């Protein structure tokens, strides 16, 4: 297995550490265990982790599916695909909260002005992320039950608290289950939700 980052020196090392951190985060969230590595240099540690993960996933299709969806990574059982996806990954956490929240507010205002009172959340978030990652040289993150959703959900709840006065310790009133039913405090999949827009707030 061989891959490289185009940078040199400290920049390249940091890119490998960042990618390794993402990989460990996804592994922990999907499997609930820590991904341990023995190598101490950035690239070596990253390669070791990629090999471990790819080998573990190659023998278990269900784990591969779960890891692929949550990690927003296609074919993670292939070490080269996994490595390149992590090194070039679009990450919501790379953008400032104020920047993303600002785009969300602009979009909410546009929808309100156009008298649109509700929209499937996945379409709203795709528009927001398209704007946020435009010109950054990477595809936007996918919208789904993946590692990006908790942060996006947090920003939506912050907006809701500030603009509607509804506290984040209670289930959202801006979000509802598209197919009905009780709203969870921390819904797991934005593709199953609808965003409701109050024109008096936005």
Image (spheres, rainbow, N blue to C red):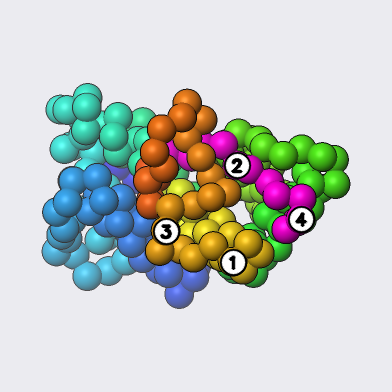
First-in-chain label (4 vs 2): 2
The residue carrying mark 4 is 200
The residue carrying mark 3 is 170
Distance from the alpha carbon under mark 4 to that under mark 1: 12 Å
43 to 129, vertically: above or below = below
Quadrant where the N terminus sits is top left
Distance from the alpha carbon under mark 4 to that under mark 2: 15 Å
Query: Could you say where residue 18 lies in the image, as x and y percent from the top left?
Result: 40, 63
Q: Quadrant of residue 81?
A: top left
Q: Please tell me whether residue 99 belongs to the stretch shown in magenta.
A: no
Residue lying at the far right in this picture: please name it: 113
Disc 4 residue crowd, few under 14, some 14–19, many 20+, Cα 10 Å: few
Residue depicted at 47% across the width and 35% down the height: 177
Disc 1 residue crowd, few under 14, some 14–19, many 20+, Cα 10 Å: few
Tag of residue 194: none
For label 4, the SS is loop
Q: In this rendering, would 150 be left or right of 127?
A: left
Q: Quadrant of residue 106?
A: bottom right
The residue carrying mark 1 is 165
Quadrant where the C terminus sits is bottom right
Residue depicted at 66% across the width and 64% down the height: 163
Which one is in front in this view, the residue at disc 1 or the one at disc 2? Answer: 1
Task: Report the span colored magenta.
Answer: 189-202
């Amino acid at each position: 297995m061989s891959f490289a980052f185009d940078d040199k020196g400290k920049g390249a090392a940091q890119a490998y550490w960042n990618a390794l951190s993402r990989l460990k985060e996804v592994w922990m969230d999907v499997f609930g265990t820590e991904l341990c590595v023995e190598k101490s240099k950035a690239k070596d540690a990253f390669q070791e982790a990629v090999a471990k993960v790819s080998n573990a996933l190659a023998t278990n299709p269900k784990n591969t599916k779960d890891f692929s969806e949550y990690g927003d990574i296609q074919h993670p059982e292939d070490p080269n695909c996994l490595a390149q996806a992590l090194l070039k990954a679009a990450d919501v956490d790379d953008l400032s909260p104020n920047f993303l929240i600002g785009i969300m507010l602009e979009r909410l205002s546009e929808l309100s002005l156009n008298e649109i009172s509700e929209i499937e959340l996945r379409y709203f978030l795709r528009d927001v992320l398209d704007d946020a990652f435009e010109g950054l040289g990477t595809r936007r993150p996918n919208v789904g039950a993946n590692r990006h959703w908790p942060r996006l959900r947090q920003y939506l709840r912050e907006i809701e608290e500030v603009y509607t006065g509804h506290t984040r310790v209670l289930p959202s009133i801006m979000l509802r289950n598209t197919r009905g039913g009780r709203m969870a405090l921390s819904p797991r999949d934005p593709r199953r939700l609808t965003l409701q827009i109050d024109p008096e707030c936005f």
